[in-house]
Image (spheres, rainbow, N blue to C red):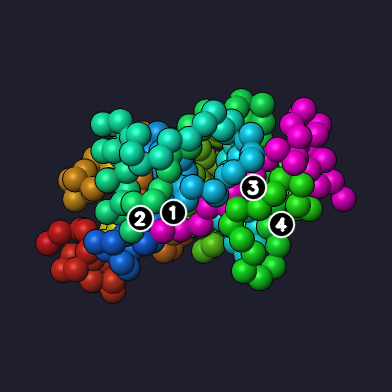
Amino acid sequence: MLTLADLFQYYGLKPEKIKLVRHGTEKTRQKKNVQLSILEIFQTDLEKFCYYQSFQQPKKFSKAEHIASFARTRGTTALFLGVWDIKGKLPPTEFNEQLLSRFREFQTEFDWTEEMVWYDLQRNPTMNELSQRLVIDWGKGTLAWVQNGSTIKNILEIKPQNPIGQFKSYDEILLSYQDLKLLIKEDAANSDWLARLSAVKGVYLIRDRLSGKLYVGSAYGDKGIYGRWAEYAKYGHGNNQQLIKLDCNHFEFSILETLPFGFDDEDVIAREKRWKDRLGTRQFGLNGN
């Protein structure tokens, strides 16, 4: 079986000079019940992600020339994000105004300590073509989130370019806003999704992960759910006044009910109203009164 170390060597990188970094999730100090997805930060705010992984304990990346960053996914798997070169590091006493400002921002958000140093990390484009495509097995148990690059890590999958995964069923759909944008942008690579979502009308659900509040909507145009969701992919809110004020990067899209094209638009809207009543999204959610 091909290992991660084998792949590093294929791309001309020395595994023994690399630290493997598997980022997980973080809880904010101000909102301990809110989990921040590091993958989501990488997808939506690359600058913040780079600062986030640059502040570390003094010896965390010692003796390494590169780090290979991964996001924790299901079970023991990890999704490759990219390689960064280590150009040096600065102790807190040498932080300039910009570094100090970003450190203070994250210190409040992630409970960081005053001992953190700043690693000067510059992204290495060598393996960018595998970013968010390469999946490895990090290993069972509570293995360290930073390990040596020569550690044996089996490659489980290299996903095709740009797809969001195989379509399984309507009731299993749970798309982040980033996945939804990718679905619409790369429709040729996701033709099965396009066909399935264009084939039905229906009632859908949007959940704001930050607040937990729900929004119920319906799709009844000639392009079905796909056509309606394409509007959300453009700006995130689909011209819904209740959603405009929120950060769409925290939205999740799912389907409550699919309906055949034989249903009149009025019947679809009636189903939408029924779901609003069932879930209480007028009184307690984002649909308004």
On the image, the x and y values in percent for residue 271 come to 32, 64
**Amino acid, disc 4:** Asp
Q: Which residue is mark 2?
A: 113
**Front disc: 3 or 2:** 2
Label 3 close to label 2 by CB (< 8 Å): no
Q: Residues within 10 Å of mark 2 (few under 14, many from 20)?
A: some
Range of magenta residues: 1-26
Would you identify the image quadrant in which residue 33 lies? bottom left
Mark toward the start of the polypeptide (1 vs 4): 1
Label 1 close to label 4 by CB (< 8 Å): no
**Front disc: 1 or 3:** 3
On screen, 90 above or below 167?
A: above
Disc number for residue 37:
1
Q: Which residue is mark 4?
A: 137
- 281 horizontally vs 155: left or right: left
On the image, the x and y values in percent for residue 125 come to 61, 25
The residue located at (39%, 56%) in the rendering is: 36
Q: Which residue is mark 3?
A: 20
**Front disc: 3 or 4:** 3
On the image, the x and y values in percent for residue 86 come to 56, 32
The residue located at (18%, 65%) in the rendering is: 282
The residue located at (54%, 62%) in the rendering is: 172
Direction front: furthest residue: 93
- Real-space Cα separation, disc 1 to disc 3, in angstroms: 19 Å
Mark toward the start of the polypeptide (3 vs 4): 3
Mark toward the start of the polypeptide (3 vs 2): 3
- Real-space Cα separation, disc 4 to disc 2, in angstroms: 31 Å
Quarter in which the C terminus is drawn: bottom left
Mark toward the start of the polypeptide (1 vs 2): 1
